[in-house]
């Protein structure tokens, strides 16, 4: 004899919400968020990872300079990326990337600033 399956208790799909999801008795697709507020939040802000600073070298540039000698600095978060600077020497690219990293990892010193 196997024990009966325990009633499923799922956590809210909003990553920073600890609430369990209450499954209604009615049939249909079970909810994944504990409340409409969480669902709205998740829709407005899809889950993203940290901001990454990448340095990379492109292929041939429009000026025909050889690959590997022209570097770019790129910011990436999840699937989105933006090139901050390109056409740099490697030393400049590394220096810029280090400065951006320092800015990103410095706690905000502007209390009360809007977060949205
Ligand atoms: Zn929730």
Image: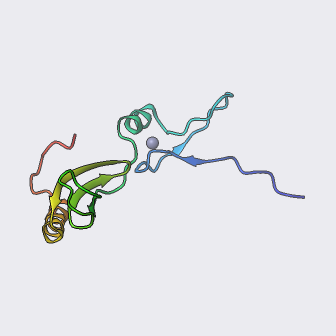
Residue 102 in the figure: left or right of residue 39: left
- Residue 23, given in percent of the width and then of the height, sits at 61, 37
Q: Position of residue 56 (x, y in %)?
A: 28, 63
Q: Give the quarter of the image for residue 97.
A: bottom left
Please, is residue 96 above or below residue 28 in the view? below
Instruction: Answer with the quarter of the image where residue 1 lies.
Output: bottom right
Left or right of residue 31, residue 73 in this image: left
Q: Where is residue 49 in the image (x, y as percent from the top left)?
A: 36, 54
Q: Nearer the viewer, residue 15 or 45?
A: 45
Residue at 40% over, 47% down: 47
Q: Horizontal and vertical percent for residue 89?
A: 15, 67
The residue at the point 14 percent across, 56 percent down is: 108
> On the rendered structure, is 5 left or right of 26?
right
Q: Image quarter for residue 51?
A: bottom left
Q: How many labels does the image show?
A: 0
Q: Which residue lies furthest to the left in this view?
A: 110
The residue depicted at 66 percent of the width and 47 percent of the height is 8
Q: Nearer the viewer, residue 108 or 21?
A: 108
Q: Looking at the figure, which quarter contains the C terminus?
A: top left
């Amino acid at each position: 004899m196997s024990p009966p399956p325990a009633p499923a208790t799922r956590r809210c799909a909003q990553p920073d919400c600890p609430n369990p999801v209450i499954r209604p008795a009615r049939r249909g697709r079970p909810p994944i968020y504990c409340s409409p507020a969480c669902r709205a939040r998740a829709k407005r802000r899809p889950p993203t990872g940290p901001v990454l600073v990448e340095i990379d070298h492109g292929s041939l540039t429009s000026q025909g300079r050889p690959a590997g000698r022209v570097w770019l600095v790129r910011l990436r978060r999840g699937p989105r990326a933006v090139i901050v600077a390109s056409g740099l020497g490697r030393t400049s690219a590394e220096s810029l990337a280090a400065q951006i990293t320092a800015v990103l990892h410095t706690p905000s010193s502007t209390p009360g600033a809007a977060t949205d």
